[in-house]
Amino acid sequence: MAVPMKFLSEELNAMKEAGLYGTIRTLESPQGAWVVIDGKKYLNLCSNNYLGLCNDPRIVKKAKEYMDIYGVGPGAVRTIAGTMSPHIELEKKLAAFKGAEAAIVVQSGFCANLTVIPTLVPSADDVIFSDSLNHASIIDACKLTKARVVRYNHSDMEDLEKKLEENTGATGRKLLITDGVFSMDGDVAKLPRIVELCEQHNVIVAVDDAHGEGVLGRGGRGIVDHFGLHGRVDVEIGTMSKAFGVMGGMAAGSALLVDFLRQKARPNLFSSALTVPDVAANLASVEILQESETLVKKLWSNGDFLKKELKALGFDTGSSETPITPVIIGEASDAKAFSAKLFAAGVFATAIVFPTVPRGTARVRAMVSAAHSEDDLRFAVEKFAAVGKEMGIIS
Ligand SMILES: *Cc1c(COP(=O)(O)O)cnc(C)c1O
């Protein structure tokens, strides 16, 4: 007889009572500036589709072309069934784009952290320095190693320096890992100082640039390019599920480092590669970014516009330095109500609550895209204003 797992309903009910149970909408359209839900059109302010590439005809075309040649599935893990040439083509292209010697492509950004962290610092005498607001996939990757994790306060360089000094006696390897752009607030890691401190203390530097790829740096080349730190960051971890508009993860660095990851990282040894259409679509995305900065510039001007307008209305848009626009409300239930009222008015902007953000800082996060027109954003501002006044969040 099946085990009666009473905890399933108990815990789900507790989440519902606390306002922490999430509704997952079904989209009947591509992830565009507008989406169709239950037959109705909504302005999309939820996706990480920064450059509007998710349904760009150029990447769809390339996926079809490659599928006609190579089919879809990779067959098995790369170390057993061999690797397909499109994957190698993508890795070369990504390395060139990032200004790194080499890159390895894995299944997702989540997997990219599992690829890098436990492989570089596996042992009990190793130490990981980790920003307190790092992404869940970094936290989980840290759980897959025996290394000791030392958390430093978010972007607090004095605290980091103190913790580096406290651990100078550690006998194993040392790795620092930080998000490049912190996705819930939109602030940027203080990478120049981090690199300086890590050089002084002989610590490997890895940055997870999931929200910086396609956003920061020249033509979206990421945080290392943004700060001109080429050659001083050991590992750039990234995702192709955000600005690139597809799916997949990567780690870029020296040829030796990438060779090491290919031979030893468990997501490469025990999980099959991306499918051919994913790889082909990613190739097209990188080509689009290499050709022109237009989309990246549009993204930033859209982000600046929305932030300025919402701030002027009196909303708390936090400390974002990127197009990410949080509207901080406070209580989870209020943020959910705000999001529900926006939805009724035709704006799809999900509430983000604990445990994704700390309790008491629940928010509606507006994600602009290069695909939004100025009219789209004016529509958003109008609806935020109406709901904010109705709920007494602004006057
Ligand atoms: C989104 C994100 C990931 C996960 O990327 P996927 O490709 O969706 O798995 C990893 N790290 C950070 C910092 C992210 O923001």
Image (spheres, rainbow, N blue to C red):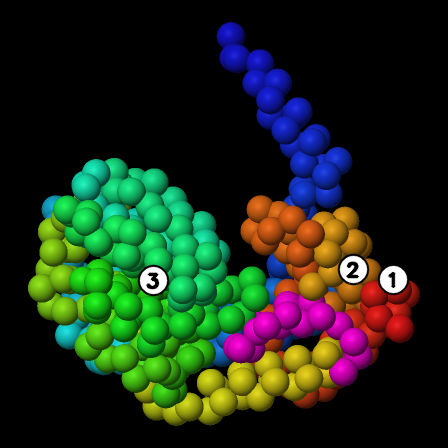
Residue 155 vs residue 185, the one in the foreground: 155
Name the amino acid type tagged 2: Phe
Tell me the CA gap for discs 2 and 1: 8 Å
Quickly name the residue at label 3.
Answer: 161
- Which tag, 1 or 3, sits closer to the chain's start? 3
Place residue 289 in its image quadrant. bottom left
Image quadrant in which the C terminus is located: bottom right
Q: Main secondary structure of the magenta part?
A: loop
The reply to whether callout 2 and callout 1 are in contact (CB within 8 Å) is yes
Residue 181 makes an appearance in the image = yes
- Which tag, 2 or 1, sits closer to the chain's start? 2
Name the amino acid type tagged 3: Glu
Tell me the CA gap for discs 3 and 2: 40 Å
- Which tag, 3 or 2, sits closer to the chain's start? 3
Residue 114 vs residue 232, the one in the foreground: 232
Relative to 340, 281 lies left or right: left
Is residue 313 depicted above or below 132 in this figure? below
Mark 2: which secondary structure?
helix
Tell me the CA gap for discs 1 and 3: 44 Å
Is the residue indicated by label 3 positioned so its CB lies within 8 Å of ligand 1? Answer: no
Q: Which mark is residue 391?
A: 1
